[in-house]
Image (cartoon, rainbow, N blue to C red):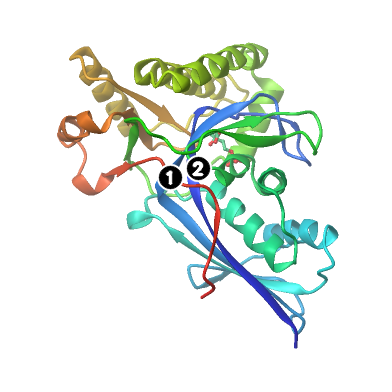
């Protein structure tokens, strides 16, 4: 029996300028560039073991066996690019406090890209890892890097990957995740973005205005300008959710409690506290703020939400190999 294995850890990221629509479904090439912050708190540990005695790929998540179809497709890409021909056992653990419903395909596929490529004997550059992770899930493209990362949309498999903008964030920015619903979303991000590209009359305006948002956000990051970055992120998120409302048939990820959290953030801002919100393909709200204001923000949010619904998260590192378990 021959066994080759590797383990990797990747952290999830939250997009400040969103990816919402593909121009190539197969290769996962996005319509527009995007920009995110990798977080310290939420991560996935994955071990890949290529094993000559296996008859099929296997996937275990948090010690439970799951359907391996999507993982197997991804492993096929790795096998195509290496001399590895065996099936693999993939074991993943999601580290998300209280199963917060923020588990993301970003950390999952970034960790799988590094663990699988290493176990297959490939020593990929971070650019190549980012391209590989992209084939599992778009947002995983950016989780290869820590801190702020930008996904360059590209036009082919070769030129669509993320680049680091500021890997070590040396200024005061964090997020408070407001956990509103821990359940699986009804419309996956894949389905949601496909529908808006096909049916929203606003889609061309989204692509155009997001390009401008991205440039302005990069400038704000360079200048450590939290207020400008937060304003851009909030407005970009609302535009993404407006696409969903304008699709045919329309859909929304908001829940009543999402709107309550959004209003509280706006109220805090009216009181002079620098905080902004963003939402992804789900109802949870992420508040962007500085650490110096996090206590007062949490206190205000606690007028409605329980303490365990509020999780403070900081900038986190890129993907790395870890000791095998
Ligand atoms: O990577 P996916 O297919 O889960 O899509 C992610 C989409 C958003 O989270 C809403 C935006 C983004 O850029 O991460």
Question: On the rendering, which quadrant does ligand 1 occupy?
Answer: top right
Instruction: Characterize the local packing of mark 1: few (<14), some (14-19) or many (20 or more) Cα atoms within 10 angstroms.
Output: many
Q: Position of residue 306 (x, y in %)?
A: 20, 44
Residue 18 seen in render: yes
Residue position marked by numbered label 2 in the rendering: 146
Q: Is the CB atom of the residue marked by disc 1 within 8 angstroms of ligand 1's nearest atom?
A: no
Instruction: Characterize the local packing of mark 2: few (<14), some (14-19) or many (20 or more) Cα atoms within 10 angstroms.
Output: many
Q: Position of residue 28 (x, y in %)?
A: 72, 38
Image quarter of the N terminus = bottom right
Residue position marked by numbered label 1 in the rendering: 316
Residue visible at 24% across and 24% down in the picture? 264
Label 2 sits on a secondary structure element that is loop
Left or right of 12, for residue 309: left
Q: Is the residue under label 1 in contact with that under label 2 (CB below 8 Å)?
A: yes
Residue visible at 71% across and 71% down in the picture? 57
Residue 73 vertical placement versus 261 (above, below): below
Q: Position of residue 166 (x, y in %)?
A: 50, 32
């Amino acid at each position: 029996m021959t066994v080759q294995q590797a383990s990797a850890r990747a952290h999830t990221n939250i997009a400040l300028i969103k990816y919402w629509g593909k121009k190539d479904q197969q290769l996962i090439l996005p319509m527009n560039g995007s920009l995110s912050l990798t977080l310290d708190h939420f991560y996935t540990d994955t071990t890949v073991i290529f094993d000559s005695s296996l008859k099929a790929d296997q996937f275990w998540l948090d010690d439970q066996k799951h359907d391996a179809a999507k993982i197997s497709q991804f492993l096929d890409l790795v096998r195509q690019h290496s001399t590895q021909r065996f099936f693999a056992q993939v074991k993943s653990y999601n580290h998300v406090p209280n199963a917060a419903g923020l588990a993301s395909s970003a950390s999952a596929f970034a960790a799988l890209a590094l663990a699988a490529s290493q176990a297959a004997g490939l020593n990929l550059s971070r650019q190549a890892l980012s391209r590989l992770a992209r084939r599992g899930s778009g947002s995983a493209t950016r989780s290869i890097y820590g801190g702020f990362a930008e996904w360059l949309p590209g036009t082919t498999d070769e030129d669509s990957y993320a680049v680091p903008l500021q890997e070590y964030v040396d200024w005061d920015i964090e997020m408070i995740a407001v956990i509103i619903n821990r359940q699986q979303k009804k419309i996956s991000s894949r389905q949601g973005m496909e529908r808006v590209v096909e049916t929203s009359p606003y889609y061309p305006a989204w692509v155009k205005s997001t390009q401008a948002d991205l440039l302005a956000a990069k400038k704000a990051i360079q200048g450590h300008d939290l207020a400008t970055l937060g304003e851009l992120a909030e407005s970009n998120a609302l535009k993404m959710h407006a696409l969903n409302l304008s699709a045919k048939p329309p859909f929304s990820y908001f829940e009543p409690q999402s709107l309550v959290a959004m209003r509280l953030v706006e109220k805090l801002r009216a009181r002079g506290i620098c905080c902004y919100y963003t939402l992804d393909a789900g109802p949870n709200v992420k508040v962007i703020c500085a650490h110096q204001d996090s206590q007062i923000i949490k206190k205000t949010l606690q007028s409605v939400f329980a303490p365990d619904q509020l999780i403070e998260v900081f900038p986190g590192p890129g993907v790395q190999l870890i000791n095998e378990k």
